[in-house]
Image (spheres, rainbow, N blue to C red):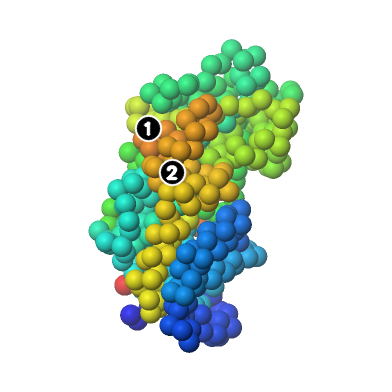
Amino acid sequence: MKKRFILSAAFVLSFGVLSACSNNETTSKSDNGEVKLTLWHPEGNTSGAYKEVIKEFNKEHDGEIEAEIKFIPRGNKYAYEDKISAAATSDTLPDLVALDGPNVANYADAGIIQPIDGLVENQEDFVQSIIKQGTYKDKLYTVGATESTVALFYNVKMLKEAGITPPTKLEDAWTWNQFYDAAKKLTDKKKGIYGVNWTLDYGEWIIYFTGPTVWSNGGSFIAEDGKKAEGYVNGPKTVEAVEYLQKFTKEKLVNLQPKPTEFEDGKAAMMLMGSWEWAKLKDYPDTEWGITYYPKSNNGEQVSPSGDWNWGVSTDTKHKEESAILLNYILNSENIIKIANADNKPAARMSSFEKMTEWNEAPLNVLKEQVLKTAHPRPSTTAYPVLSTKYGQAVQNIFLGGDAKKELDKVAKEVEMEIERKK
């Protein structure tokens, strides 16, 4: 299949990088007919678990299939994506490619990964959000081991002293107005305590953590078919949602220059943060914390973000059948538990999740409930890298006092240009 050149989220990939990856990474067979498969995954928390899984796979398939997993350091936020783009251009992709959820449409459209319909065992056992994330133009391209979400972490002592009781049931989740009132009450400018902490950066985080506010308000980032941004990312409901978030920064309920451990140090009473944060908080035993649900719209609509790294079969593989055997082994119920535990994330298979009993009890049950009942993947569009980056920059400017409509108009224009360029 002829692959079209794609832009990574960094937007520019030099020809020097392309030529540097000319070594052959494609599959081969040994003298005894054993199929050699390669996998790429970003270096991180799951590296040890994946090494163990691949080692066991090779033992079970000795003489038939041998897999080698390579972990790519992420020297900058997009170093891994740049390497994928380079390999796609030089036809040296590995057999299995790990990719972040929002990149599925981009990679599928560019011919980097191929449909895997009919190849995934017990597909119905995966949580719905992971299947929706991996689907492009009604075809399944990817599946993953873990899911993620964003919830509201809170300082138990601070809320108790303020007479605030956080919701313990999904149906009782705070509305944005209730959340705003709580943040206002908890803010103590004399003591330098902010009502809530949320991270600000130009990367993927902003569209991830603000997405549910937009969706629950009836807004969106792009048309359902991913081909039109005008009237969506800058539509009235999206603008209204972002303006509501702007209230928190305008009124200094959120610190625009927080320290990395602001919540842990007791300088923020609440924190909107990813599901992985609970493991980090174990390192701060003096901070008693809890988790409650991502706030719902003032009309009662409940949405939470979802999406995580997942696996696709590359179009360069010469051994699709063997790649599918490896994919299903990696993502069987027991191995998913190993990977999910290594990354402190929700499992993407129901059968795995049911065995992870810690997630059935407070406070992790909040995260599990969101994954199963309110999860919403990020937009599926070939223009996603531009959409995510430009939207992140716009929201940064809005939080700093910029006009929401004007900033989002700029995003719509940039994304429309990217969509047209892709044609």
Query: For this rendering, which residue is in front, 395 or 115?
Result: 115
The image position of residue 352, as x and y in percent, is 43, 43
The image position of residue 83, as x and y in percent, is 54, 73
The image position of residue 399, as x and y in percent, is 56, 42
**What numbered label is drawn on residue 399?**
none
Distance CA(mark 1)–CA(mark 2) = 25 Å
Callout 2 crowding tier (Cα within 10 Å): few <14, some 14–19, many ≥20: many
Residue at left 32%, top 56%? 121
Q: Is residue 118 above or below residue 82?
A: above
Residue type at numbered disc 1: Gln
- Residue 99 visible in the displayed image: yes
**What numbered label is drawn on residue 352?**
2
Q: Is residue 282 above or below residue 202?
A: above
Callout 1 crowding tier (Cα within 10 Å): few <14, some 14–19, many ≥20: many
Specify whether 92 is left or right of 221.
right
Label 2 SS: helix
Q: Is residue 318 above or below residue 156?
A: below
Quarter of the image where one finds residue 273:
top right
Pointer 1 and pointer 2: residues touching (CB < 8 Å)? no
Residue at left 48%, top 56%? 309
Residue at left 43%, top 59%? 329
What residue is shown with label 1? Answer: 302
The image position of residue 369, as x and y in percent, is 42, 33
Residue type at numbered disc 2: Ser
- Residue 233 visible in the displayed image: no
Count up the numbered dots: 2
